[in-house]
Amino acid sequence: MRSLLGLEAFAPIADELRSVSEKLLESSTVSILIPSSLTGVVASAILEAAMLDAEIPYRRRFSPRQVSPPCIIISEDIISERELDPSIDSISLDLAPLFSVGLRGLDGEPKRGVLSPVSQVAGLAELVAPDGKRTRRLRPFLLAGNWWADSIDQGYDPIYSTLLNHLREEGSIRVLPLPEVETPDLSELSGLDKEREVSTRETWSVLDADSKAEAMSKLVLPLVIAEKISITRLEELVWRRIKISHSDRDLHSILVEIQNRFDGTQSSINVLIEQLIANSY
């Protein structure tokens, strides 16, 4: 894995994650406090996978409730900046959506977005268990926080794009057009002509680049006209489908399944977390 902490997006929190990771390795049982949300599901699964890989004892708890250090709290209230007090010996880490710089334009102008707690947890996980099998397997899911947020629908999300490119460059994922993905979930592409999708898939391998572009344009044109999905999200679902390196499935399809099975109850959240850790998707 290539370290996430080298990305500018992680600059506001990198030192804190490093400090906490060192303390975790010598810690007693750590409380992980999570919201009853999709963010809580994936963030907790990534963190718990690393804790298991590193053999660090932990307990899962649901907010709202009070927990005492050592603890890691996943929350969903956006903050603008973080303050690190290195003098604090106990572990008390609050990971919340954080405005940060995703990348910079040619003129050096910063492109800002939200670094989700799911991504932040992945940064901590790579420090805690850099060679952990569970940690590596769940690494692509760090994109879930930004994918489920509405920033992609508002236009370009520099954080999501930076994280996706990072995962692709390190080999954790492949980015493929829809016809090259086996059995993708198409429920997010409401209005897609299923017969044309099958036809495009069957002829895809013999088409040249121009013919592929034309075929895809004809396939998605009704969705563009219907305006039921943002252009940015549509492009991701048809041109930049995320294939997980260790899996036969694509990330978008798995995230849809998690959404469909999530009902907000603690019992369903527990099941989803355990299945993610156990690689049951």
Image: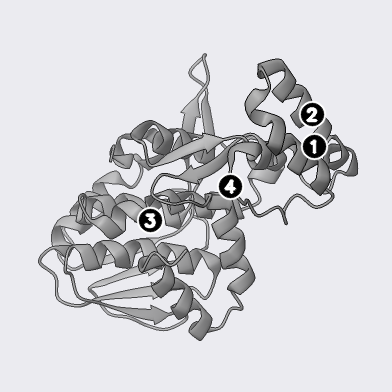
Q: Is residue 39 left or right of residue 153?
A: left
Give the CA distance from mark 2 to mark 1. Answer: 5 Å
- Name the colour scheme: one colour
Tell whether label 1 touches label 2 (CB within 8 Å).
Answer: yes
Q: Is residue 149 above or below residue 106?
A: below
Q: Nearer the viewer, mark 3 or mark 4?
A: 4
User: Which residue is denoted by mark 2 in the rendering?
Assistant: 217
User: Which residue is denoted by mark 4 in the rendering?
Assistant: 182
Which is nearer the N-term, disc 2 or disc 4?
A: 4
User: Which residue is denoted by mark 1 in the rendering?
Assistant: 220
Which is nearer the N-term, disc 3 or disc 2?
A: 3
Q: Measured from the top left, where is residue 38 in percent x and y?
A: 54, 67
Tell whether label 4 touches label 3 (CB within 8 Å).
Answer: no
Q: Residue at x 26, y 61 (%)?
A: 50
Nearer the observer, 32 or 197: 197
Give the CA distance from mark 2 to mark 4. Answer: 20 Å
The three-letter code of the residue at mark 1 reads Val
Q: Is residue 71 left or right of residue 221?
A: left
Q: Nearer the viewer, mark 3 or mark 1?
A: 1
User: Which residue is denoted by mark 3 in the rendering?
Assistant: 138
Which is nearer the N-term, disc 3 or disc 1?
A: 3
